[in-house]
Image: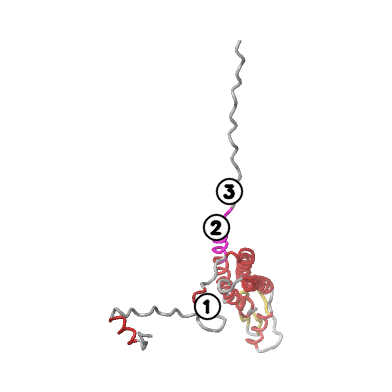
Amino acid sequence: MSAASQTPTDTAPQGDSGPPPARPARRAHRSLALALLAGAAGAALALLASGRTWAEGSAVLAQGELPRTVTGADVTGVPGALAVVGLAALVAVFAVRRAGRIAVAALLTLSGVGIAVAAVLGNSDTSALREKAATAVGLTGTDVHHVTHTGWPWVAAAGGLLLLVAGLLALVYGRHWPAMSGKYERTPGGGRGPRRTPAPPDLDRPEEIWKSLDRGEDPTR
């Protein structure tokens, strides 16, 4: 009587069902593109909002009411100034390395925070509007009535938040971003780097000798 043979069951190797690890290069490229887009858009929004009307009101006169308006630059010059600083820092991130890049990224982050805070505080500020009303009426301490605020301070605040995002991306992923080429960097002595010496002329070729003489070189040296 033959013994029953057991059929071996082949166990297929279980593959890794998890997602593949993200590639650092791809992650760096995505963060770089996002930082550039967020930083440029944030600076543009802050500069645009600074020149728009933030508040409106009326100064009361004996003849009636005199309407007055103030722009973001009248209320506070912080968003517009920090937008320029943030834009310059965004460009400077690619010109520096290591500790310099971290410092510039921190400046970019702080610029975004300053813009957002200044815009939120300026949304409820009526001092610039009262000052304009006093100048128009000619009386110090003139009050304004029917004060309304537009949405442009919040646009500036949104621009500051975008710059903040760009700065945080630069702080986290900036060390993986490319830097400007060192082709034209100066050497420590202040020069443009060692100059490549031309190859010695071939004395068997008359045209090479004439070219050396035209350059003021001694072909026999």
Asked whether the beta carbons under mark 2 and mark 1 sit within 8 Å of each other, the answer is no
* Disc marking residue 185: 1
Image x and y of residue 112, in percent:
64, 71
**Image-quadrant location for residue 205:** bottom left
Q: Nearer the viewer, residue 111 or 33?
A: 33
> Counting other residues with Cα less than 10 Å from the Cα at mark 2, is it few (<14), some (14-19), or many (20 or more)?
few
Q: Residue at x 36, y 89 (%)?
A: 216
Colour theme: secondary structure
Q: Which residue is mark 2?
A: 26
Q: Could you tell me the amino acid type at mark 1?
A: Glu
**Image-quadrant location for residue 70:** bottom right
Image x and y of residue 58, in percent:
64, 78
Q: Residue furthest right?
A: 141
**Image-quadrant location for residue 45:** bottom right
Image x and y of residue 102, in percent:
64, 70
CA gap, disc 2 to disc 3?
13 Å
Q: Could you tell me the amino acid type at mark 3?
A: Pro
Asked whether the beta carbons under mark 2 and mark 3 sit within 8 Å of each other, the answer is no
Q: Is residue 137 above or below residue 149?
A: below
* Disc marking residue 20: 3
Determine whether, in the image, residue 178 is placed left or right of residue 112.
left
CA gap, disc 2 to disc 1?
28 Å
Asked whether 31 falls inside the magenta stretch, the response is: yes
CA gap, disc 1 to disc 3?
39 Å
Asked whether the beta carbons under mark 1 and mark 3 sit within 8 Å of each other, the answer is no
* Disc 1 element: loop
* Disc 2 element: helix
> Counting other residues with Cα less than 10 Å from the Cα at mark 3, is it few (<14), some (14-19), or many (20 or more)?
few
Res 151 visible = no
